[in-house]
Image (cartoon, rainbow, N blue to C red):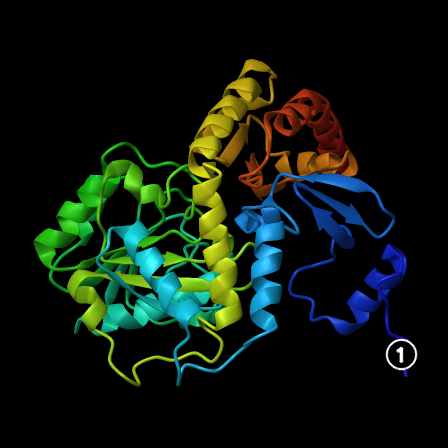
Amino acid sequence: MTELVSPASGSTEVLRAYNGSMINSFGPPKRVFVRGEGVHVWDAEQNKYLDLLSGLAVNALGHAHPTVLAAVTGQLSTLGHVSNFFATPAQVTLAQRLSALAGGDAKVFFTNSGTEANEAALKITRLTGRAKIIAAEGAFHGRTMGALSITHKPKYREPFEPLPGPVEFVPYGDAEALAAAVDETVAAVVLEPIQGENGIVVPPPGYLAAARAITAEHGALLWFDEVQTGLGRAGEWFAHQAEDVVPDLITIAKGLGNGFPVGACLALGATADLMYPGSHGTTFGGNPVAAVAALAVLGVIERDGLLDRARRNGDQLARDIETLDHPLIAEVRGRGLLRGVVLTEPVAPAVSDAALDAGFIINAPRPNVLRLAPPLIIGADDLSSFVQALPGLLDTGRVAAGEARV
């Protein structure tokens, strides 16, 4: 029998066991992490890292936040799971809180992840009696079959075709192209208020409002995928609220549970009445432990003023990076604490690796873009430490990328 790894195992031992026991869908892990506290994590050899990615925009309150920890352990000591044959106070309270944040006219279907939230939204769009979806070029909505059908990148889509449809992709941010694509056959238009996996792309002002007017004219639903941008990441509860637009569907996950798997599909207005008993289901969605974790996250964001903090720290971070005047830095895109550092050369993966070696966790969603999505609790001093290190990381990454091409 294979000897099992233990919490005390070193990185080499864990990675060897990983390769022998895990399906190879992610490639080799870059590190083995064993502990987190606040905005830092430690690997198996006790090297310390500043987390500027938050587990892909998940850990809004950082690691081991005491309020979330207390909520989860307290709930587990009383009631962990009952299935959706029954209700719990935490589940209903969370639905009420999310409805209020969305404008007070929403009903909620709870899921375990963002792609599952998008699957629920897709089923709601089919209940309009129409089937066609308009999505955006560069969009990422998940990798389950339905969510994959509205994800644009051919590398993700093509091995699994044929996918559900029909789906038409239009240029992101182009209101004229969107208007030309929408007619009375369209069930919904799905958009990220800020595209994350495409390199933190912010649409031009007025684009989301134009999408609302276009869909309303043709009786189509407007669906905002806020899985990465929602719950304070962009400095608002929902990123689309910066344009004061009210959609028909909102999907969320990631930052909602601060690491506990929980997502939700919010249906607003008459859209909330399209689903009926038996039309969709989930075993774990909205269980009481997930619900209290999410309620704790929302409470801390509100109590500690983290929306304003995300705006202030994110704006300062962008200014500080652009002030570096480094030849590899073209611009900084994004809002709040979701930022993309656009580079003049396609060396972002090598720079990301250099940052990890130096104790900073970031990633490269595109060859020329570095993504920064730190915990909302991060302080100015920690952000400044990264900015000060960035020129050296860029130089190291460019050299490494050049050597790799030789």
Front-lying residue, 30 or 276? 276
Residue 252 is drawn in which quadrant? bottom left
The amino acid pointed to by label 1 is: Thr
Query: Taking 246 as reference, is 29 left or right?
Result: right
Query: Taking 116 as reference, is 402 left or right?
Result: right
Q: In which quadrant will I find the C terminus?
A: top right
For the question of whether residue 372 can be seen, the reply is yes
Front-lying residue, 238 or 394? 238
Label 1 residue SS: loop
Q: Give the farthest residue toward the left.
A: 217
Q: Report the residue at 48% width, 82% height from top.
A: 82
Q: Report the residue at 75% width, 38% height from top.
A: 404
The answer to whether 182 is drawn above or below residue 402 in the figure is: below
User: Residue 295, percent across and down?
Assistant: 46, 57
User: Residue 99, percent across and down?
Assistant: 29, 57
Query: Taking 286 as reference, is 213 left or right?
Result: left
For the question of whether residue 259 can be seen, the reply is no
Q: In which quadrant will I find the N terminus?
A: bottom right
User: Residue 184, percent across and down?
Assistant: 11, 62
Query: Taking 295 as reference, is 92 left or right?
Result: left
The answer to whether 107 is drawn above or below residue 320 in the figure is: below
Q: How many labels does the image show?
A: 1
User: Residue 135, percent across and down?
Assistant: 31, 55
Q: Residues within 10 Å of mark 1 (few under 14, many from 20)?
A: few
Front-lying residue, 399 or 197? 197
**Can you identify the residue that label 1 sits on?**
2
Q: Report the residue at 77% width, 51% height from top.
A: 31
Q: Report the residue at 24% width, 55% height from top.
A: 104
